[in-house]
Image (tube, helix red, strand yellow):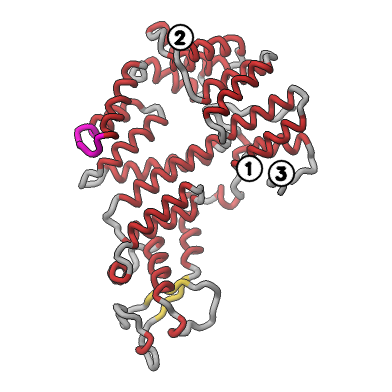
Amino acid sequence: MKPPLRENHTATGEQNKTRSEDETEQSPAEAFEARKKLALSSIVYIRFEGKGTHAHVPDGIDPSIPYPVQLQSPVIKVDPESITVESLLAGMLRVLAWDPANAHAATYRTYIKAVRPGLFEELIAAGIQKAESREWVIAEEIFFAASGLEPERPEPSINLALMHEEHAKHLADSGLEEDAEKEDDLAYRYYQSLLARGDVFPPAYYHAAFFFLRKHNYDRVVSLLTSYIGMNDDEARTERARSILEKLKDLGYLDTLFKEAYDFIQMGKEEQGLERALLFVAKYPDVWNGWFLVGWANRRMGRWADGEQAFRTALEKGAEGVDVYNELSICEMELGKLDAAKLDLERALRIEPENVKIIVNLGALAYRQGRTKEAEGFFKAALEFDPEDNIAKEWLKKLDPGLNSGRTGA
């Protein structure tokens, strides 16, 4: 049986299991506590008191309380002379990140702000840089530290929400739908917390609107963007919010038929979804997204010709983005129109050159056309962008069972 093509909106079952059995069996709370325990295992607490110690007390330190020191390697005994301000700052930040309710947290915050008054802004910038580099775990801990340092500031939470959302998109593009959903759940919790703040934080309304837009919760999008427009927060963002509201109205996204069609197809009830999608296109014949739903439902039911025609109509009505080309190419491949499928996948790749699902499908197409070496190159390229992509790994094992499933070579 051939390895699967990359599709849109659908999970990939057993291929999604990339975590260890121990991790999958843990509840989110248990997993967090395990990470907390590991993070704090490199911390040792010391007191700057006793004979010979007072000479080594850094300025601003209260000798009566214990201070956390970040160890670089295990030691039996900490020499006060070896303790630097940086090791103290690192220790206090780690404690504030993972144990912000620590009995001496307020003292640690006061000390950090006195020694490094601009550290909060430095942490936010560093966390954003790590998130952009897809170093998710490191970015998360940096934002935790920023939150522990300034618990009342909303910036760490909005950045955590955006980071989890971006991670979810990356996982979804790699076919890891279950893991993506977990990341989206975390993003949702941060957005909900920000929206519930007593003091309104306008960026939360703006970014949360785009989160719910991606989730096709259009009623929530309208509510959030309408509220945001009234806040006079940022002129460019306000104009974009108005534009999106107009577009949602013009494209019929606020129509109940569209929402019902999408939800039915998403839940695997394609016949009911197709019925409503057809009613929608009868009502909005010139709106491309309705035709996309018609094509999506037909493709999922294996009605390749009907799916192809619907996706072509969507393109004629102004559809854009990689999804429509990808879905169309799947129908074309199943109909034996391999050259046409190649052209559409190449169009998609020009729009998003690093889209793993498109690269994998180009590899699958090359394989079907007998271009094995070219196919292998596509699958290895996909793994360069995402080393954990299971479908690319599966294809490489099919091409050469002796290949290391996790590496692409030097």
Q: In which quarter of the view is residue 394 placed?
A: top right
Q: Nearer the viewer, residue 122 or 398?
A: 122
Please tell me the numbered disc located at residue 405.
3
Residue at 41% across / 31% down in the picture? Answer: 214
Q: Residue 169 appears at what percent x and percent y?
A: 49, 37
Residue that badge 2 annotates: 278
The stretch drawn in magenta includes residue 232:
yes
45 versus 177 height, above or below: below
Residue type at numbered disc 1: Glu
Label 3, label 2: how many angstroms apart (C-alpha)? 43 Å
Q: Nearer the viewer, residue 300 or 354?
A: 354
114 versus 148 height, above or below: below
Crowding at mark 1 (Cα within 10 Å: few <14, some 14-19, many 20+): some
Q: Is residue 315 left or right of residue 407?
A: left
Q: Nearer the viewer, residue 132 or 309?
A: 132
Label 1, label 2: how many angstroms apart (C-alpha)? 41 Å
Where disc 1 sits, the SS reads helix
372 versus 204 height, above or below: above
- Disc on the earlier residue, 3 or 1: 1
User: Which stretch appears magenta?
Assistant: 227-235
